[in-house]
Image (cartoon, rainbow, N blue to C red):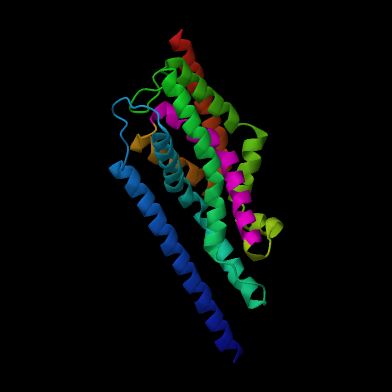
Amino acid sequence: MTVSIDATLEALVRRDRQVVIAALTIVIALSWGYLLVGAGMPMMTPVSWTLGYAVLMFFMWWIMMLAMMLPSAAPMVLLFATVNRKQRETSHPYVATSVFALGYLAAWVGFSLVAVMLQWGFERTHLLSSPLVGANVILGGVLLFAAGVYQLTPIKHACLGHCRSPHAFLGTHWRQATLGALRMGLEHGAYCVGCCWFLMGLLFFGGVMNLYWILGLALFVFFEKNVPAGHWLGYASGVALSVWGLATLVLAF
C-alpha cells in the first residue's frame, strides 16, 4: 500500500513538473517569437513619443525581459512547483505555480518602466539612433565600463548567489498561501533584477532590437546563473567589460 501511495505521489509530482515545463516553454517561445518578427516595432524611422508609443515600448521591453530571463529562472520555478506539491501533501494550502511566476515577472515591470524612460531620454538627446542603437561612443564606453565595474561589486554577487541557490532561497523565504507565493516571486525577481539590470542596460550599447546581442546576453545570464563556475563568469565578464569600456573611452579622445 505504501509503495502504491509513493508511486502515485511521484506520478503527481512528475505531472506537475511536465505542466510547468510546458507552460514555461510556451511563454518563452511566444516571447522570442515576438522579438523575431519585431511585432509592432516601428523603429527604423524616427517616431514621435506619444502615450500609445510609450506603452508599446514598455511592452516591448517587458516581453524582451521575459524572453531573456525566464530560461535562467526556470530551475527556481520548477523547484517551487515541486516543493509546493509536497506542501499540499502535508495539508498546506495549494498555490498555483503561476502565482510565483507572476510575481517574478512583475519584478521586471519596474525595470521595463525605467528602460522606457531612459530610451526616451537617450532619443531626445540624440544618444540613441532610430534603430535603437547607441549613437554616441562616449555613452557606449561609459555603459561598458560601468557594467564591468558592477559585475565586480558585492551587491551583484550577493544577488547572483540568491539566483544560483534555489534550494537556499526557498528554504529561507518560503511563505504560505497565494500572497506568500506572490511575494516570494517578487523577491526572487528583485534579486534577479539586482543581478542583471546593468547587463540588460548594455542593450543600449549593442542595440535594443539586435537579436544577436539579445541572444548573447540571454545565454550569458543563463550560464552565469546555472553552471557550476557561473560566479567566476561574473568576475571575468566584469574585468573584460571594464577593459573594453576604458579602451572605447580612450579611443574616443
Residue found at the very far top of the displayed protein? 253
Magenta stretch: dominant secondary structure: helix
The answer to which of 237 and 215 lies nearer the viewer is 215
Say which quadrant the N terminus sits in: bottom right
- Which residue is at 40% across, 53% downward? 28
Residue 154 placed where, x, y %? 67, 35
Residue 195 placed where, x, y %? 58, 40
The total number of labels drawn is 0
Give the vertical position of 135 relative to 11 (above or below): above
Q: Is residue 229 visible?
A: no
Q: Which quarter of the picture shows residue 132?
A: top left
Q: Which quarter of the picture shows residue 95?
A: bottom right
- Which residue is at 64% across, 54% downward? 183
Residue found at the very far front of the displayed protein? 51
Residue 189 inside the magenta-drawn segment: yes
- Which residue is at 54% across, 36% downward? 197
- Which residue is at 62% across, 52% downward? 165
Residue 53 placed where, x, y %? 39, 35
Q: Horizontal placement of 14 versus 88: left or right?
A: left
Residue 69 placed where, x, y %? 48, 46
Residue 148 inside the magenta-drawn segment: no
Residue found at the very far right of the displayed protein? 172
Q: Is residue 112 visible?
A: yes
Residue interval drawn in magenta = 179-207
